[in-house]
Image (cartoon, rainbow, N blue to C red):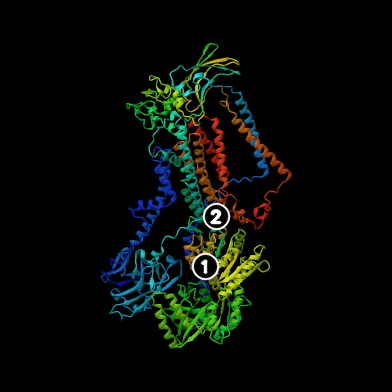
Amino acid sequence: MKRYVYINDDESLQELYCDNQISNRKYTVLNFLPKNLWEQFSRFMNQYFLLIACLQLWSLITPVNPASTWGPLIFIFAVSASKEAWDDYNRYLSDKKANEKEVWVVRQGIKKHVQAQDIHVGNIVWLRENDEVPCDLVLIGTSDPQGLCYVETAALDGETDLKTRVIPSACMGIDFELLHKIKGVIECPNPDKDIRRFDANLRLFPPFIDNDVCPLTIKNTILQSCYLRNTEWACGVAVYTGNETKLGMSRGIPEPKLTAMDAMIDKLTGAIFVFQIVVVMVLGIAGNVWKDTEARKQWYVLYPYEGPWYELLVIPLRFELLCSIMIPISIKVSLDLVKSLYAKFIDWDNEMIDQETGIPSHAANTAISEDLGQVEYILTDKTGTLTENRMIFRRCCISGIFYGNESGDALKDVELLNAVAGSSPDVVRFLTVMAICNTVIPVKSKTGAILYKAQSQDEDALVNAAARLHVVYVNKNANILEIRFNGSVIQYEVLETLEFTSDRKRMSVVVKDCQNGKIILLSKGADEAILPYAYAGQQTRTFIEAVEQYAQLGLRTLCLAWRELKEDEYQEWSLMFKEASSTLVDREWRIAEVCQRLEHDFEILGVTAIEDRLQDGVPETIETLRKAGINFWMLTGDKQNTAIQIALSCNFISPEPKGQLLLIDGKTEDEVCRSLERVLLTMRITSSEPKDVAFVVDGWALEIALKHYRKAFTELAILSRTAICCRVTPSQKAQLVELLKSCDYRTLAIGDGGNDVRMIQQADIGVGISGREGLQAARAADYSIGKFRFLKRLILVHGRYSYNRTAFLSQYSFYKSLVICFIQIFFSFISGVSGTSLFNSVSLMAYNVFYTSVPVLVSVLDKDLSEGTIMQHPQILFYCQAGRFAVFPLYFFFIFRVFSINRLRIRNWANLLHYFSRQLYICWLMVIKLMQDCF
Amino acid sequence: MNSNTPSSSAGRAGSADSAAPRRNSKRPKYSKFTQQELPACKPILTPRWVISAFMLVSIVFIPIGVVSLFASRDVVEIIDRYENVCVPESFRNDKVTYIQSDVDKICNRTLRVKKLMKQPIYVYYQLDNFYQNHRRYVKSRSDSQLKNNNSQDDVDSCKPEDNTADGKPIVPCGLIAWSLFNDTFNFSLNNQQLAVNKKGISWKSDRDSKFGKNVFPKNFQNGSFIGGKHLNSSVPLSEQEDLIVWMRTAALPTFRKLYGKIERDLQPNELIQVTLENNYNTYSFNGKKKLVLSTTSWLGGKNDFLGIAYLTVGGLCFFLALSFTVVYLVKPRRLGDPSYLSWNRNPGGH
């Protein structure tokens, strides 16, 4: 399906698409009550309580006053309904603020001030500097003569750098005044939530230009909620409005995650329900038999000989009502309450505040804290998660000469400085690629210094290093780049940018040297994406050695390459590229294919090595958590050697005699299969030895293993406590999480970048590091923390406490309601199985709410062991992982106790029902209290 | 040229600075609650503590148990089961017919006092296998009608004893009142009437606030099927103490209810003549009827259970204290020895 947007057409489009009224609301005033009730009653527990409450209205069978169930039920419903209502009201207020904001829109050819909600698809919207973008726009004009503008997309994807947006070529050079009158059609896909893609076409109507189709990409759009920066004004055509914008579409409510504990509680509820039905049937039959044999003789009961048709049902239903409190009505509310408090404790924790940035930890998902205490597998990203993601250029290898090996810092290497001073051509070419083969934007600050706005930390490091080596990237003016080298300014015109994708693993730019008009392709990328494409005859051995050497030091390597293009080769390719760029279907794949045609026969210039230091406390954290029985998997896009080095330096794996690394590799199915089997065999043998065995697999072999040998790989995953997966794509990361989840393991995924988002969402618990790669991962995650080392505290302290507290609370809830129920059941045997309630309504209600539900909430402050003890003996976590619910017989011990107390009082306070029940009630309030204190 | 790097890092710091105040405002304020550092008491159960706690419990409980056992033993009780012996030989095979017939049901019993009984001596009747706690029975009453003269018609809950055949409300209505116990007991000692005080046998709160002073029995026991005792319709309900006692329904099918008090001492070996009217039908459901004369101690009536319970718990604690002491002396263990932690005991076997 496609959407045709007619620019500036005031009549036709008004009704076709929605206006720009943003609505995040779930309810309206009218549908709030029915919709909310419907939602609440879709839960089994609530249906059950409603049924019980309705049955209680029948006075013949109700053992107690209906108020004792209706009261709590209405209270619980009112609490959750008012919480929903409050949230919705706040959403309404923020929507209203956004909707009533005034913006400049062209109406009937005149610029008018209208409210943001009145923007329609096809309208032209004018923005000034620092304005928020009210809806998704296709740029058609900016104040910049080159048609550029800068936007900050932090609200959309969390990335704080400025992004350039450019007007489509068709609109280039249209006069400021004429923009009011522009007419045309934009052919774009139906609204979706992909904020990285916009595959559309634009055709302007005469007299503006011939009807040539101009491709539009995400680069030509400015999306809702972004801010216009460093640009005086910009204007664009509204293509998606209201809730159909990219932001609006991606806003959807994520699937709620269910904790192991919740599942356990549900199961327990089910089991108790079955038990209850059994009790009701047994007692119902017994009651009817007793009635027919004994009660007829008890003349004072005056049973009629002929009863109504439903007589047989009366006694079972009475027992159903009597036993209905077996399933505690308060458990849901109490658990919700304490869970949100756990989340608050995480938010409040002073020891999990990142001291550098002052960002506290945050629990976005308040419902899954206790799962943290049950984690069995942690899947972690490397860059930015284990490491600081602060890249520093350390070493390089230029045409076979290694720089920076002695001092450990190439920038201080005298040989390199001499080579630069001597304008050695290889070195200069190398530095030029470092400086301009990127998407960095230099911004001149007020003091005249140059700041680089880079999307990737590697590029930032390379550009800064080049600047230190006197190749300074000074200015980017539209397509013209300026490099200052040894006092002279060299200009390059950027013809095309072949952007980095995680599949291609390289990026290239095609530039034209303005001095001599030569067209050059500059590339940088991972070694396996560059070195195999060297021109025939070039010796790449030294580069491979360099890459290996650097990787062993744990450095990140990039290969730089270039190639001179012939004019006609470029022209021919450029046409293909343009065509691929304007396809609407599979554009990314098509572009990758076209890029492939240009990126070959490289002349390899050299290898850069960038250091990414480990974060503070990473080895200790990993060691502690491994002691707690948690298995670690490292999933990284980096190459094998780097990954292994980092793994060694952060205690991930142990060096040789103690640890053993098993490699799964191979290019074909057979090779992978053989190596997988070999590894599996070793793994089985060594699993009994106290040895750290880890396996290493790369993306390619993983792909094959997951596809063809899933079973064997799953077995390997179960056997192995540690794994390193390198060169993996975001979707493979998610697949691995899926694999572990399918083996019934509790997984935690931690990452910091956009490539970890899928894994984070897939895992039982997603943790995001609010790091340098933007907030994308932190936003998608259930928990966001500032540093990797906080994970230890998050799991061992918060996870464990939450688990213990919830376990206690839910056990206790069931215990206290089972107990009062059992007393009623035992009493029924001495009251002629007639369904008499031993307790009156007020006592029952007070028991359920005031005496047992409220005071026990104090247990959220309970700490069974001090934080220091847990940190010292992380093995304590085994108990949480195994699940404390296993101690089920404990219940029956308690029940027995109460039963014995029951016996104790019976003869003593003999005779009066009222008095007896009150005594029993008080006495076992004391017992319950005692239980509370003992735990 | 070198100016670029410092400036860029300065820029980084600058941007962090500008963001810092906004973020710092999110920083939680320190409090003991938010940091989960509220003061707490965490007793460590060292052997000494445990042994002394058990010892303390046994030291407190065993004397209490002994004292309450003695108190219970001091209570003198005379129990006389009469429902069988009070049926004439000729009716022994069909007691139900006997109890429903109009023959004279006077029965004489002699009770011998075994020990000195100090006043007040409580006279109870005890019924067995009588389900006053049956749901149909226990609900069949109208509290508002008992209390308030204006709500005579409030008989909905009293079914099936709510209205007379001609539709007039019964006061007091319901099965409980209708089945009021109607055996009577007269005591004499050496041919002298032994006075039984029937005042003040019910709860004061019941007389004052649950049974009305201006509510009089009406249409009571007028039906064809007479349940139990008739009530004097000129006496208000608040003074019908037998009814008030009866309407406090018993929790268990075996129960005693207070009949009256004898306010003089009874010497050992004195013979008490009891003239009783055996009117109440317990024969149809094989219920027992017993007459009980009992003194009280400071602990109440005769009941060994409390004493035995205290003795058992105290004894158990003493035994535990002793055995822990033995274990502590024979095989002492260092406090906080990590080798006893489960993961150290059997490595890998978690």
**Mark number for residue A733?**
1
For label 2, the residue is A798
Residue A707 in the image: above or below residue B303: below
Q: Residues within 10 Å of mark 2 (few under 14, many from 20)?
A: many
Q: Reading the chain from its start, which is encountered first: label 2 or label 1?
A: 1
Q: Quadrant of the N terminus of chain A?
A: bottom left
**Are labels 2 and 1 assigned to the same chain?**
yes
Residue drawn where x is 57% and y is 51% of the image: A884
* Residue A211: quadrant of the picture: bottom left
Q: Residues within 10 Å of mark 1 (few under 14, many from 20)?
A: many
**Mark number for residue B256?**
none
* Front label number (2 vs 1): 1
Which kind of residue does numbered mark 1 sit on? Lys
Kindly identify which chain the residue marked by label 1 belongs to.
Answer: A
Q: Position of residue B235 (x, y in %)?
A: 40, 20
Q: Position of residue B211 (x, y in %)?
A: 41, 26
